[in-house]
Amino acid sequence: MKPRALAVAVTLSGLLLGGCASPLANKTADAAAIHTIEQNARLARYNFDGEVRVKAIRLPGKVESLVEGDVIGEVAKSFSLELRGAVDMSKSRVEMTPTFRFSRPNAETWLRLPMLAELNTLTLWVDASVLDLAIPVLRGEHKGKYVMFQAPQDKVKKLPIDAVLAELPQVAKNIYAAVDSKAYTFQPLDEAARQAGASYRIRLTLDPLAEAKMSKQAVQELLKLARRHAGEHQKEVEEFATAVGPLLDASQEELQTSSQTDLLVSRSGKLLGVSELREFSVPKEKELAVTVASTVRLSNHEQPVFSMQPTANNVVSFTELQPPSWLGGKRPSDDGEEAVDADDEAPLDEAALAAEAAEEAAAAAPAVKKPAKAAKPAKPVAKRKPKPVARAQ
């Protein structure tokens, strides 16, 4: 190859490689993590699936002495929460299908409740078919329909929902930027990261003190957001701000958390997954602690697929549902009873009505006494003859 041609090839290769350079190149761990979190919140178009379950449980000795073996721990580990869904913030839609599962060898039961939220209209559609035994109309005339819950739209239009949603990526950035930079570290890729196709694995480690600080920072950022858009409701926001501080402090005294979170990030800076270990502990019971493991995988970036598609034909408003009898609604037998009552109260013909009216009038009229019979004339009294008087001789 001629020197000139070689120079051109090298230059083009450099341009191509430069154009494909990762936006995370040469960034520190904290800067790379914050950039990834902000971009994921700003684009926010993807599908997700994951799982949450108890990984370990530590009990006080006095509790362990009451049960044989690790029964409580085994029962806790048998429960899990599976999540799958889709996010498309360009349409203000979030779909989530939680599945609550209990699983043991040769025994399993689960409950699923798909739901779809449209944030800018404050509308929620729920596939409540899991409740059809308790709510008969869901297996009758409204079988297979989504139940819709919706806030009054005339009031929703007055709320700055779109403006608030647009600022959430910046809020997320501010929250994670307030964390000590030393809490972020790059980690070698593990098997889960390689399977996800990640080029970076960034870890965020927070002890109870750092968790408490981050929680307070999150509250402050959300309060700032609320103040910017409160309008005529500034007084309510300030009242809430005054009340939430002591509540947050009290909750952190009762329950502490620490966490280790791994962000799996692609070369282009897309978030591909999150795995986390979070420990909950009670300061007053130092021997009591529960560790929860969660994993979330993201896919179909910029092309999310939604499984729920509400239309006019497959939706019924919650306000249109007749409540079941155990909530004060009609029982199925009520209609039959009403029909029987209606038959008993069927209108009489005119003759019967006239006869009934005559009887009522007669009963209401005062009783008339019959005239007394004339007294018979008294019989004449017969005169008695005087007895003869005996005279002396």
Image (spheres, rainbow, N blue to C red):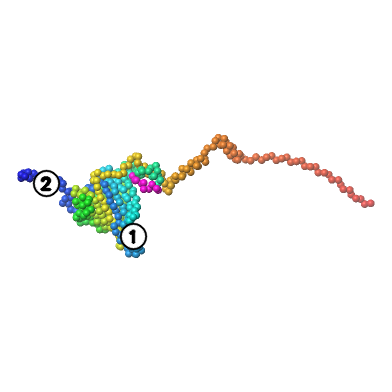
- The residue where tag 2 is placed is 14
Q: Are marks 1 and 2 in contact (CB under 8 Å)?
A: no
Foreground tag (1 vs 2): 1
Pick the front one: 366 or 335: 335
- Tell me if 33 is positioned left or right of 1 in this view: right
Which residue type carries mark 2?
Gly
**The magenta stretch spans residue 273:** no
Tell me which residue sits at (36%, 43%) in the image.
144
Pick the front one: 389 or 262: 262
> Residue 347 at what x, y percent from top left?
52, 37
Q: What label does residue 316 carry, if any?
A: none
Label 2 environment density (alpha carbons within 10 Å; few <14, some 14–19, many ≥20): few
- The residue where tag 1 is placed is 72
Disc 2, SS: helix
- Tell me if 30 is positioned left or right of 96 in this view: left
Residue located farthest toward the top when viewing the structure as drawn? 350
Disc 1, SS: helix
Quadrant of residue 19 within the rendered picture: top left
Total marks in image: 2
Structural distance between the alpha carbons of marks 1 and 2: 60 Å
Q: Does any portion of residue 74 appear in the rendered image? A: yes
> Residue 129 at what x, y percent from top left?
36, 46
Magenta span covers which residues?
A: 125-134
Residue located farthest toward the left when viewing the structure as drawn? 3
Q: Quadrant of the N terminus?
A: top left
* 290 up-or-down from 39: above or below: below
- Tell me if 262 is positioned left or right of 362 in this view: left
